[in-house]
Image: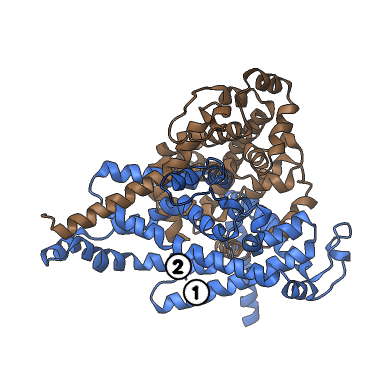
Amino acid sequence: MKLTRGDKTFISLIYFFLILLLFAAFYPFWNALAISLNSGTDTAHGGVTFWPRDFTFDNYLFVLKNDALLHGFMISVIRVAAGTVLSLFFTGLFAYAMSKKILIGRKAIMIYCIFTMVFSGGLIPAFIVNRNLGLMDNFWVMIIPSIVSVWNMIVFRTFFEELPPEMEESAKMDGCGYFGTFFRVILPLSKPVFATLGLFTAVYHWNDWFTASIYINNQNLKPIQTILQQVLSSTVMMEQMVNSNASAQEFMQRTRSVTNKSITMTTMIVATLPIVCVYPFLQKYFVKGVMIGAVKG
Amino acid sequence: MRTATNKSTIYKRERGKLYELSRQWELQVMVLPAVILIFIFSYLPMYGVLMAFQDYNIFEGMANSPWVGLKHFEMFFQSPEFSNVMRNTIVISLLKLCIGFPAPIILALFLNEVNRMWFKRLTQTVSYLPHFMSWVIISGFAASILAVDNGSLNLLLEKTGLIDEPINFLSTSKYFWVILASANVWKEIGFSSIVYLAAIASIDPQIYEAAAVDGASRFKRMFIITIPSIMPIVMVFFVLAIGNLLSAGFEDILLLGSSPVVQDVAQVIDTYVYKYGIQSSRLSYATAVGLFKSAISVVLLFGANKMARKYGGGLW
């Protein structure tokens, strides 16, 4: 089809806007990367934008030697693993049962679930409940309350309902119960939805700093995002972390090139890296997952 | 006679139900843990909302705390911060609605006009990425880029000669709302456009061809075909957005508005609840404020849905 002159200006304008957006979306990350690869003392002189000026890996070496930061990363990794597996397991099973029309009480349970989406008790009553359950300063406060997600259940259920029933029937013929059918037939067929919701759940657990910030006082149980938030909100925090750690202190004195800012930026990069690495591979799945969620929700 | 048959059928039905229940015990076992968890972590807090009408004492528990009626609600309405908090909540939400709601729709419309597939895919991949970053990271980026000493934005503005002195963006009240809204658009524009892109993809291409034959320009086709076609899904999201009007945001405001200087423009209902409930332990008072917000949100959601149904799109 031939393009008129009006069409051409219209399209060039669109490209112009999109390139601007592309730059705006990418620049903060790129800038942080450049600062993290630049010597901290040099960054303090200003002007580091796209490329590191005084290239060094000192910041990364420092972060990898700092026990407090490493411990935070470890807590985050354990939390993501436990939280994602438990959540997918219980929510998936729940959704599978809810996808069966013969389930007694199906409608009542659905209303029971939907109501929690419209009205919630709010922050303080939830805080009291968790506190009374003994979840203060407890690792499981970051896992158990979010195991069942009604939203994810609805997405799962929609997916399960669209699976061809023949496969399940043949499994039934072979004497499989519901559990057997779920694990042997449904699970292998549902990789896309597990990948999507797995990604969303994992990202939630990796990114959530707030839960730990109100329920956990023990510094050794805090995930990396919560530690990072403390570091960003007070400059004293990083110094404390360095001073409580002999090897980090020695490193800081030897190199003299790391600063609060360069370490913070480096920690931020390290904390986003897992997401940046994993998500492009799952992109094709989550577009579909978002659609199901949007239409049904 | 009649009653006797009735009784026997009821008996039969009961037995039938029990029998069916025993045949699907596995399904019931699958549902049970979820129902219990939802009860503990969603319904117990709903019951706990009643402490908004008490002087809750953490050592006495709800059973022994005295009832005080609407005292905490009145205290909130009469507090000197009330008008400020309400203003901030409404202004910030409206700002987010006015900028954050149309932005992804415009992005989807623009992406739809792009013919170079690699460019479209690149823009999508890059613009989805911020959605997966935490507000902690984003507030860190913001602090670095908007910094007074050598922040990239100040460098750019100084170099282009727009300002002489670097501006302390994050500690100046008048910039806070703009920064907050921009950061939100930055984070969600790409990801929110997914649904609209999918809606656009489902439009029959023949309609476009017919319009092109009739001589409609690309720009015109966007207005007379694409936009009307995605209107239903836009309405659904609009209803949801109205229901959330009193949720101005929480993590973003808490982290970006941490400077004490901007509190007069940054304090919204949710951060107010956090400040009084968690930081100052005025539990009943904070619960009352939170309940006030939830109640209005439910009313807004139902109201917006009713409005949307008039125009053919609604949630239920």
In depth, the one of A281 and A163 nearer the eye is A281
In depth, the one of B267 and B157 nearer the eye is B157
Asked if labels 2 and 1 touch by Cβ distance under 8 angstroms, the answer is yes
Q: Which chain contains the residue that carries disc 2?
A: B
Q: Quadrant of residue A114?
A: bottom right
Q: Position of residue B73 (x, y in %)?
A: 75, 73
Inspect this view and state whether residue B244 appears: no
Q: Is residue B296 left or right of residue A162?
A: right
Q: How is the image coloured?
A: by chain
Q: Quadrant of residue B308?
A: bottom left
In this picture, is A205 found above or below B284? Answer: above
At 70% from the left and 61% from the top, the residue drawn is B273
Disc 1 target residue: B304
In this picture, is A60 found above or below A81? Answer: above
Q: Is residue B20 left or right of residue B56?
A: left
Q: Position of residue A72 (x, y in %)?
A: 66, 33
In this picture, is B285 found above or below A290? Answer: below
Q: Position of residue B181 (x, y in %)?
A: 50, 58
Identity, as a three-letter code, of the amino acid under mark 1? Ala
Q: Which chain contains the residue that carries disc 1?
A: B
Single out the residue that lies furthest toward the front: B164
Identity, as a three-letter code, of the amino acid under mark 2? Phe
At 62% from the left and 47% from the top, the residue drawn is A147
Disc 2 target residue: B238
Residue at disc 1, secondary structure: helix
- Circle nearer the N terminus (1, 2): 2
Residue at disc 2, secondary structure: helix
